[in-house]
């Protein structure tokens, strides 16, 4: 009977080592693998998930009082990015926004540029700062460098430059009645 008692712990030890080895190999297979743009399916994958269109949300984008200002001193831009299938997606890259006065009776309606903002989304912190999980839109509070936004007619232009992708554009014309 004693020989059985000695044999039992050895079998338990072997089972424990086998379980530990299995768990270690499972952990190694679940480890995050580095991404490679050279992978055969990478181009097809990028075509599927990269944004193909941006759209300034006309009913949500508006002059805003940022930092507790008494009057509108900026614009809150709500922007949608859509993939090839038309679904909303997060977008990384460089967003460029330009605010112009409207030039009346002209072929090029964009008059004097009043402001330009460059916003880079390159890190998870950047994405958290500008992505709204509830609406699934990007939210950019853009403050004017000097003063407030006077009543008038304006054109807001948006551009997205993605790494390795096409440049995407949208334009929104709006009237600010004042505060």
Image (cartoon, rainbow, N blue to C red):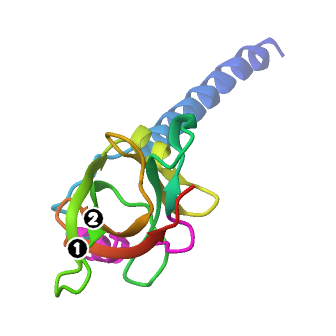
Left or right placement of residue 121 versus residue 23 in this view: left
Q: Is 73 positioned to the left or the right of 59 in the image? A: left
Which disc, if any, is residue 100?
2
Q: Residues within 10 Å of mark 1 (few under 14, many from 20)?
A: some
93 relative to 139 in the view: left or right = left
- Quadrant containing the C terminus is bottom right
Badge 2: residue crowd in 10 Å (few <14, some 14–19, many ≥20): some
Horizontal and vertical percent for residue 93? 27, 55
* Residue sitting at x 33%, y 40%: 146
Residue name at image x 37 percent, y 60 percent: 91
How far is disc 1 from disc 2 in space, using C-alphas?
6 Å
Residue holding disc 1: 110
Q: Are marks 1 and 2 in contact (CB under 8 Å)?
A: yes
**The N terminus - image quarter:** top right
Pick the residue in front: 43 or 118. Answer: 118
Q: What is the secondary structure assignment of the residue under circle 1?
A: strand
Q: In this rendered view, identify the residue nearer to me: 111 or 132.
A: 111
Residue 42 at x, y percent in the picture: 24, 68
Magenta segment includes 60: yes
Residue 135 shown in magenta? no
Where residue 54 appears, as percent x and y from the top left, is 37, 73
Residue 27 image position (x, y, % from top left): 49, 38
**Residue 62 visible, this angle:** yes
Which stretch did the figure color magenta? Answer: 42-61
Viewer can see residue 82 = no
**Disc with the residue nearer the chain's start (1 vs 2):** 2
């Amino acid at each position: 009977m004693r020989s059985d008692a000695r044999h039992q712990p050895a079998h338990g030890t072997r089972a424990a080592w086998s379980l530990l080895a299995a768990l270690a190999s499972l952990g190694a297979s679940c480890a995050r693998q580095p991404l490679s743009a050279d992978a055969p399916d990478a181009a097809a994958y990028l075509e599927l998930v990269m944004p193909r269109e941006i759209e300034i949300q006309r009913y949500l984008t508006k002059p805003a009082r940022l930092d507790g200002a008494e009057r509108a001193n900026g614009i809150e831009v709500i922007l949608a990015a859509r993939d090839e299938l038309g679904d909303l997606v997060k977008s990384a890259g460089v967003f460029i926004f330009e605010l112009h006065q409207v030039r009346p009776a002209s072929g090029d309606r964009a008059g004097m540029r009043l402001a330009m903002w460059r916003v880079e989304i390159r890190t998870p912190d950047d994405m958290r700062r500008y992505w709204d999980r509830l609406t699934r839109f990007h939210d950019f509070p853009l403050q004017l460098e000097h003063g407030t936004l006077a009543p008038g007619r304006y054109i807001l232009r948006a551009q997205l430059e993605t790494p390795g992708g096409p440049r995407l554009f949208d334009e929104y014309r709006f009237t600010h009645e004042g505060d």
